[in-house]
Amino acid sequence: MGYFAYYFAWIALTFVLRYPPLAVGLVVLFLLRQFIPDPFVLFRTMGRTRALTRQIEANPANVTARRDLAMVYIDRLRPGRALALLEEARKRFPDDAELLYLSGLAHAKRGDAAEAVPLLVRAVQIDPRVRFGEPYLVAGDALRKLGRTDDALDAFERFVGLRSSSVEGHVKLALTHRALRDEAAARAALDEAIRTFAVVPGYQKRAQFGWWLRAQVARWLV
């Protein structure tokens, strides 16, 4: 978009300042972003949801359709619906690493950290590289919520070992080091996050910009 993005941002800011209630609404939406599905996700998955539902109705044993629909519901922030589908799928394939990972992710999205961790651990025991290490990242978040900071550190270290290009992984590793009062390790992880952002492709920069910004703020506070 080039400079058009700046023009649009300036026009939007001017409009918001003229209508204070709109600004309040935007702040509320920002605070509730973890509980309100992204409108783009809803629009993008609308037809796919209907198609997958029809496939399951036609063939209840279709595990692939159940898995894919569960992923849609996770994206739509409806983890309870996802879990119902995944539980049925796991009855047929109880040791499928991806189904275990998705079940753990859905539990984590519901706030059930204690339920999520065993599923995520089982997933990586079966396939350490499932989803390129994503179970370790989700497990790290869940373990921190449970107060198991040392275990969370191990999970984040394993994640960045598999996904060194993840700025998010390096930042979460740094924050966990800081929680354990290891400021030198925290600073090193933040430096690595900033270096990583500098070398990833443009599309990854756009996706990881928020985590780069968080790394900069955290680095300044060290």
Image: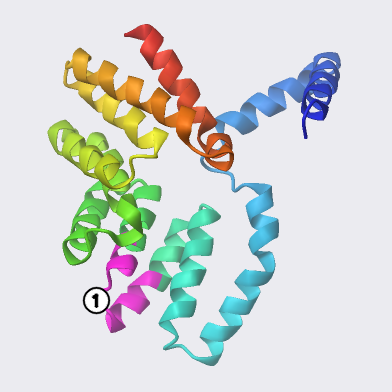
Which residue position holds label 1?
Answer: 94
Q: What residue type is disc 1 on?
A: Pro
Q: How many marks?
A: 1
In percent of width and height, residue 152 lies at: 20, 37
Q: Mark 1: which secondary structure?
A: loop
Q: Is residue 40 left or right of residue 149?
A: right
Regarding residue 176, the answer to whether it shows in the image is yes
Query: Main SS of the magenta segment?
Result: helix
Of the pair 196 and 93, the residue shown nearer to us: 196
Point out the residue furthest to the front here.
199
Of the pair 25 and 137, the residue shown nearer to us: 137
* On-image quarter of the C terminus: top left
> Which quarter of the figure has residue 179?
top left
Instruction: Give above or below for 149 relative to 66.
Output: above
> Which quarter of the figure has residue 88?
bottom left
In percent of width and height, residue 23 lies at: 73, 21
Residue range of the region highlighted in magenta in the rendering: 86-101
Magenta span includes 137: no
In percent of width and height, residue 197 lies at: 46, 30
Of the pair 88 and 101, the residue shown nearer to us: 101
What residue lies at 49% left-to-right and 70% top-to-bottom? 68
What residue lies at 33% left-to-right and 68% top-to-bottom? 99
What residue lies at 54% left-to-right and 35% top-to-bottom? 205
Point out the residue furthest to the bottom here.
58
Magenta span includes 100: yes
> Which quarter of the figure has residue 195?
top left
What residue lies at 58% left-to-right and 36% top-to-bottom? 206
Crowding near the residue tagged with mark 1, few <14, some 14–19, many ≥20 C-alpha atoms within 10 Å: few
* On-image quarter of the N terminus: top right
Point out the residue furthest to the left here.
150
Instruction: Give above or below for 60 relative to 137.
Output: below
Q: Is residue 39 left or right of residue 21?
A: left
